[in-house]
Image (cartoon, grey):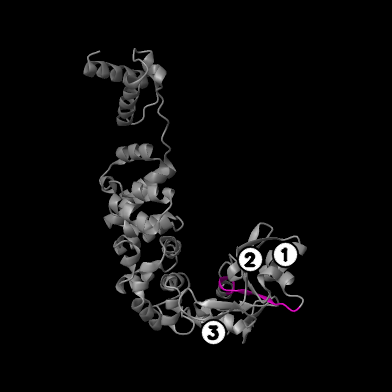
Amino acid sequence: MIAARSLRDASWLTSGPAARVLALLNADGEEARVVGGAVRNALMGLPVGEIDIATTALPDEVIRRARLAHIKSVPTGVEHGTVTLIIDSKPFEVTTLREDIETFGRKAKVAFGRDWARDAMRRDFTMNGLSLTPDGQIHDEVGGIADIDTRRVRFIGDASQRIAEDYLRILRFFRIHAAYGEGAPDPAGYAACIAGRDGLAGLSAERIRAEMLKLVVAKNALPALVAMDDGGLLLRLTAGIGYRGAFARMMHIEAKLGLPSDSILRLGALTVAVTEDARRITRRLRLSNAEAKRLDSMGHRWWRLAAMDDAVARRRLYRLGAARYRDRIMLAWARSGHQGDAGWLEHATLPDRWTPPAFPLKASDFMSRGIPEGHALGHVLALAEDAWLAANFPLDSSSLNSLADETVSRFKHDHRL
């Protein structure tokens, strides 16, 4: 049915690339509407990111029209009815309406259709089941507007049946609730997620990773994770690890430092106490190499940072670099339990106040003192760098000459050269 509200004044709907796609597909007996998250976000007053479009036109017709309009098309999921159109470097997923013929999980047999209400009933949650015509009229076949008004994330139809169609919907239920819901999760949906939790074992690591990294940075991530943990769901997704307290403190620390939400930092707080934890969650979620290295660095002896003074903090910053240093400090702070500790704040903001200088001594400084090229030279350079750090980064020539002389003398004495 057509809802009383409209979005006819939305600038992204009336002009620009989205308007071009809609105009292209709303002609010659075919219809197209904006569907899903873009409609939901617009009604909530939130930024509209990706804009998905549904149409009565078949995929071949979408491609034909795009070609005639000199618009690039990519058959990203053409067997499922999805073609991606790219206008001004912005992608739009265009999907032909579908309806179920036989329903048996993710392998349900579907056919292309022309019934907007039946297409809406195939979607996951009511607030994602709205469609929007080019003139700004909102069509709500599933009660999505009422649920948006009350910030309730509710499955369309029978929750258990929708979950059985795709068990990833369990994780999506909590992720969407964390981002757009308020209060406790919908009781019927929550109960169905708990009842279907064994189905999580069949999900690919890549699909779980994508949802988890979005969930942990959502506005209400903490209560959503608590609800998942209480329902026996969280540890199935995180390789048996879950540190709720550290996660809560990490959120507090990010806010205290004025930093944006960071999915890997928050995942580290939730799942990493030692480097073995980092390896377990990396395997469970199949994290990228960069993500895995970052988690591993965060978990490496973070407890050594708990009692360090400013001089030690500067040496750690020099060795680790600003990014790895801040990651490890923030994990240590989150694990310490002392949110308001001024010392932690001083350490965490050190990269903003001080940039470590480059080690000023060169190989030539030691070769001129009789150290030959090769292993010995590398060893002397490492000894000199350690001594330079212990001396608090001197840069004047007198101190550097003395340090080089002392290092060479010590090396020759130790190796009886």
Q: Residues within 10 Å of mark 2 (few under 14, many from 20)?
A: many
**What segment carries the magenta color?**
29-39
Residue most extreme to the bottom:
1
Q: Is residue 74 left or right of residue 333?
A: right
**In the displayed structure, would residue 134 be above or below residue 341?**
below
Give the side of residue 101 with respect to residue 91, left or right: left
Looking at the image, do the residues carrying marks 2 and 1 touch, with CB atoms under 8 Å apart?
A: yes
Q: Which mark is residue 83?
A: 2
Residue 362 lies, in percent from the top left, at: 41, 22
> Residue 24's spot in the image, x, y percent?
74, 69
Image quadrant where residue 375 sits: top left
> Nearer the observer, disc 1 or disc 3?
1
- Identify which amino acid the numbered label 3 is placed on: Val
In magenta stretch: residue 30: yes
Residue 253 visible at all: no
Local SS, label 2: strand
Relative vertical location of residue 332 with respect to residue 91 in this rendering, above or below: above
Q: Which mark is residue 142?
A: 3
Say which quarter of the image contains residue 280: bottom left
- Which amino acid, by three-letter code, is at mark 1? Ala
> How many numbered discs, if any?
3
For badge 2, the amino acid type reads Val
Of the residues under marks 2 and 1, which one precedes in the sequence?
1
Residue in the image at 22% along x and 14% along y: 416
Q: Residue at x 30, y 25 (%)?
A: 383
| Residue at image location 72% in from the left, 72% down from the top | 25
Determine which residue is flagged by label 1: 66
